[in-house]
Image (cartoon, rainbow, N blue to C red):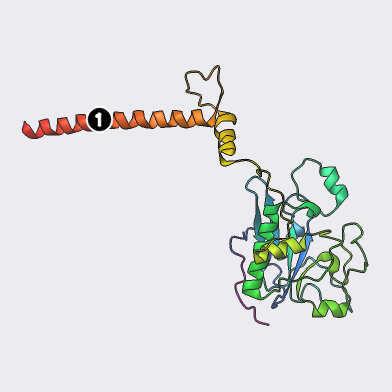
Amino acid sequence: MAKTGPQRYPGASTGYWYGSKYPGSAMESNVVVWHTTEGTSLPAYDGGSMAPNFTAVPDFKAKRLVWYQHFDFDSSSRALVNRAGGVETNTLNAVQVELVGTCDPTAHKRWGTKAHLYTADLPDWVIRDLGAFARWARDHHSVPLTSGQTFVAYPASYGATKTRMANAEWLAFKGHCGHQHVPENDHGDPGTFPIAAVLAAATGTTTTPTEEDPMAGYSKRDIAGATWDEDMVPAPEFAPDYAKNKFWKPSAYLRSIYNAVITIRDELRAVRTAVDALTKSIKES
């Protein structure tokens, strides 16, 4: 089966490419299966023998997902169990995405303040970037921005649960599901994955209720006064009074910048005048 459309997700690194070692089967992917790695870093995937098509790694400092691509979009990957005598899983038009993080509340609690993603409470920037991937999959591979599946919290999602698709349902399915929905498998990831929010981000809509404006009741003058006259920012270390005043009001900082610019302007004018006079003198000599 021919692979239609672009096979590489823009910006994704191929530094951990396994498509040459495990060529897989050509497909026309119309299903995205979401996973969680249950860790905090890019897995080794046993040298690629258990790798998905993509891994999304959180960059908490930059507030973005860093994407790694291991196989072509329309090539079967290796993150699902495929038992004999049943249906195809890895090779049945399913592109697989692992999100570095956990769906396990026990792991989430154990990791505590260590930077990690927990699918029951993903930051907005993660949902944004997952939505961007889902939108690209729709635009270039016609993967529907639909699910219809209930994402059950882990560990109730583990095993032969009611949310796991029957063989016939899996064969007919198109859209977005989780590892917990795939037949012949028992894993419960990605738990309570916010699929509605991800698909809403992909379409440019939102599922977040409108929150009360925290600045309601304050005038522009009130806000400006609080910003420029009450907030404090670190003072420049070259300031004459830095030893005593290590923080300035923003308005004072702006005044200092203005005064410095005026001084530079006046000095440039003096330099220009001196250069003009010297030039004139040279021409007349």
Pinpoint residue 59: horizontal percent, then vertical percent: 66, 49
Against 278, residue 123 (above or below) is below
Which residue, given by chain and number where applicable, does mark 1 sit on?
271
Residue 17, visible in the rendered structure: no
Give, as a three-letter code, the residue at label 1.
Val
Boundaries of the magenta span: 1-9
Task: Name the quadrant of the C terminus.
Answer: top left
Residue placed most toward the observer, 27 or 215: 215
Q: Is residue 214 left or right of residue 241?
A: right
* Circle 1 crowding by C-alpha within 10 Å: few under 14, some 14–19, many from 20: few
Instruction: Tell me residue 128's x, y (percent).
Output: 67, 58
Q: Is residue 168 visible?
A: yes
Please tell me whether mark 1 sits on a helix, a strand or a loop: helix
Q: Position of residue 116 (x, y in %)?
A: 75, 47
Which residue corresponds to the image point at 84% horizontal and 72% vertical from the top-left? 82
Can you say whether 210 is above or below 2 in the image? Answer: above
State which quadrant residue 54 falls in: bottom right
Judging depth in this view, the residue of 6 and 191 nearest the camera is 191
* Residue 154, image quadrant: bottom right
Horizontal side of 236 relative to 265 (left or right) equals: right
* Residue at 71% in and 71% down: 145
243 over 251 or under it: above or below: above
State the residue at coordinates (89%, 61%). 157
